[in-house]
Every structure is written in C-alpha cells, then in structure tokens.
Image (cartoon, helix red, strand yellow):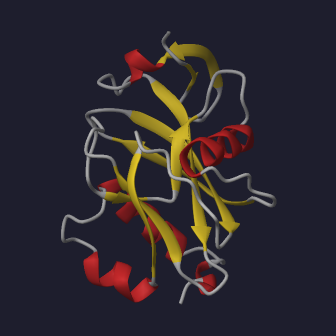
Amino acid sequence: MDEMLTRVTDLDEILGPVARSQVHGNPELIHRSVHILVIHPEGRLLLQKRSLRKDVQPGKWDTSVGGHVGFGQSYEEAARREAAEELGLVPGELTFLYPSRIRNTVESENIHTFLHVSAGPFRPEPGEIDELRFWSKAEIREALGTGVFTSNFEEEFALFLASPHAGLLD
C-alpha cells in the first residue's frame, strides 16, 4: 500500500494527502519531510550511510535521521516515528532547529530539522542504513565536496553551522 504524505504549498500550507509514489519524480508536488541531527554528548554528529539499495543517493553519508511526514502527522510526530524506525531510538527531548527547503528535479520538500543529544544505543534499520558513525566537525569539513555526503546533507550542515546550536559540535 502506498504511503500517504502531506502535500503543501511553497509556504507550507496543507493542501491534502498525496501518495509517496507520486512525489518522487514530480517536483511540482511539494511535501513535508523531517531531519534529526543526533549529537553525541562529547560533541560529534551521528551520520548514517544510506543503504546501497536506496533509489536516491545510495551509499552516501547523510543526516542522522530523515523521512517524510505522513498525512495527518505533525513534523515532530514524524521525526519521532522516523527516529524509531531508522535508529531504534525513542528520543526524549527534541529541539526544533530550523525550517529549510529542497527543490530539485526529483522532488520538492519543506523540511523541519530537530536536534537530539544521545550516545545511543542505536539499532539501524538494515533496509535503510548500511552503517552509522559519529563524525567530528573537522572530519565533516574535510570530506565536504568530495562526493562522500549527499548534497542534501552538505546543505543541512551549512544551516546547522549557522545555527545557535553549532557550538555543540567539536
């Protein structure tokens, strides 16, 4: 059965449900997504290596958690669901960081990014994630632009560094 997502306007006003199968490949259908940046208490950022079986950017390192907002869900509800599905993590406090947007030839997403501090344990979903690893700010900066990360993560990282919470990273 096709997952129903939340279709929105450019200004994030809800238009109604839209099937997941319709949004990828049709950038006219703007939908909601969530990201969570999980930071270790010692100041490193958890990244996931996308499964080689993924349709979009397989084998690249990406944000800690990312996924779509189901129709009828809030951004925070979707973030909590995705954390449980992808990492086996039930986050306590989630701090809202910022809204952002992805607009490309494949899809159009309005995103809310949250922050969570955790050392784990994590149980990565094998169909989604090939590997998890904590990265220092210096390691991430060194790898930027080399093709190691998804383009979405590189944009996300720049937004995070401009946020008031950037000091949490070593």
Q: Total number of numbered labels?
A: 0
In percent of the image, x 51 and y 47: which residue is there? 66
In percent of the image, x 59 and y 85: which residue is there? 43
Q: What is the residue that sits farthest to the right in this orientation?
A: 92
Q: What is the residue that sits farthest to the top in this orientation?
A: 1
**Which of 113 and 77 lies nearest the eye of the viewer?**
77
In percent of the image, x 59 and y 59: which residue is there? 122
Q: Is residue 10 visible?
A: no
**Which of 155 and 92 lies nearest the eye of the viewer?**
92
**Residue 21 appears left or right of 15:** left
**Residue 163 appears left or right of 76:** left
**Residue 10 appears left or right of 112:** left
Q: What is the residue that sits farthest to the left in this orientation?
A: 146
Locate residue 163: give its quadrant: bottom right
Q: Which x, y percent locates residue 63?
A: 46, 59
In percent of the image, x 32 and y 47: which residue is there? 51
Locate residue 98: give its quadrant: bottom right
**Which of 85 and 102 lies nearest the eye of the viewer?**
85
Q: Is residue 59 above or below residue 68?
A: below
Locate residue 37: give its quadrant: bottom right
Q: Is residue 76 visible?
A: yes
Q: Which x, y percent locates residue 17?
A: 59, 14
Q: Which x, y percent locates residue 164?
A: 66, 78
Q: Which x, y percent locates residue 166?
A: 58, 80
Q: Is residue 16 above or below residue 50?
A: above
